[in-house]
Amino acid sequence: MSTVTLIGSRLAEPGSEFVYEGEADACAGCPYRSQCLNLEPGTKYRVTDIRENAQTLECAMHDGGVRAVEVEPAPTRANITGKGAFAGSKTSLPGPCPYVACPSHEYCEPDGVSFDEEYRIREIVGEPPHDICHLDRSLELVELETGD
């Protein structure tokens, strides 16, 4: 289900994704607060549509102003342990990884996902992009449902 919100004009493109981090100090006193601060902090969203004929509004946080868009929680690709996982089951991430140069690092520590929470597996993608896990983990790349 889509939610209408305001985001920075530079992000206002269908398909763009972002993690909503919550209210910033510069938001205090803004007349558009209720329209901007209506998302779940720490959740990854995808822009699904831009509101037609909506004007660009001035914003203390975004130098190009903000625009009205429709967003929905975006699924997140992540590496999980446990071969044999299946779509529909629940899982959590194995934990942080210090190997930032690894091609799988973005999937071992994906944006918008916490290590201490469980998520439903939306789809099994397959093998992770790395050849060797330096933490000796047996990993599988999946798509997680991160929104409600």
Image: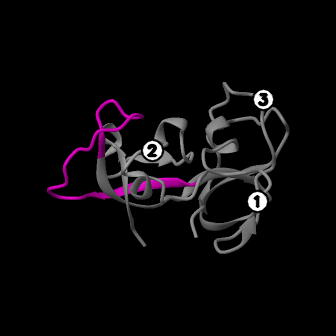
Residue 128 location, quadrant: top right
Which corner quadrant holds the N terminus? bottom left
Disc assigned to residue 83: none
Please identify the residue farthest to the left as the structure is shown: 53
Observer-nearest of 112 and 58: 58
Where's residue 99, x and y in %?
Answer: 74, 28
Q: Which residue is mark 3?
A: 98
Q: Which residue is mark 2?
A: 29
Left or right for 33, reference 109: left
Disc 2 crowd, CA 10 A, few/some/many (<14, 14-19, 20+): few
Magenta segment main secondary structure: loop
Disc 3 crowd, CA 10 A, few/some/many (<14, 14-19, 20+): few
Left or right for 47, reference 133: left
Magenta stretch: includes residue 56? yes
Q: Mark 2 or mark 3, which is nearer the start of the sequence?
A: 2
The reply to whether the C-beta atoms of the residues labelled 3 and 1 are less than 8 Å apart is: no
Q: Which secondary structure, mark 1?
A: loop
Q: Which amino acid, mark 3?
A: Pro
Q: Which secondary structure, mark 2?
A: loop
Magenta stretch: includes residue 50? yes
Observer-nearest of 32 and 102: 32
Residue 23 against residue 120 in the figure, above or below: above
Disc 1 crowd, CA 10 A, few/some/many (<14, 14-19, 20+): few
Where's residue 56, x and y in %?
Answer: 23, 44
Residue 118 against residue 44 in the figure, above or below: below
Q: Which residues are magenta?
A: 43-66
Q: Which residue is mark 1?
A: 117
Q: How many marks?
A: 3
Left or right for 12, reference 76: left
Please identify the residue farthest to the right as the structure is shown: 136
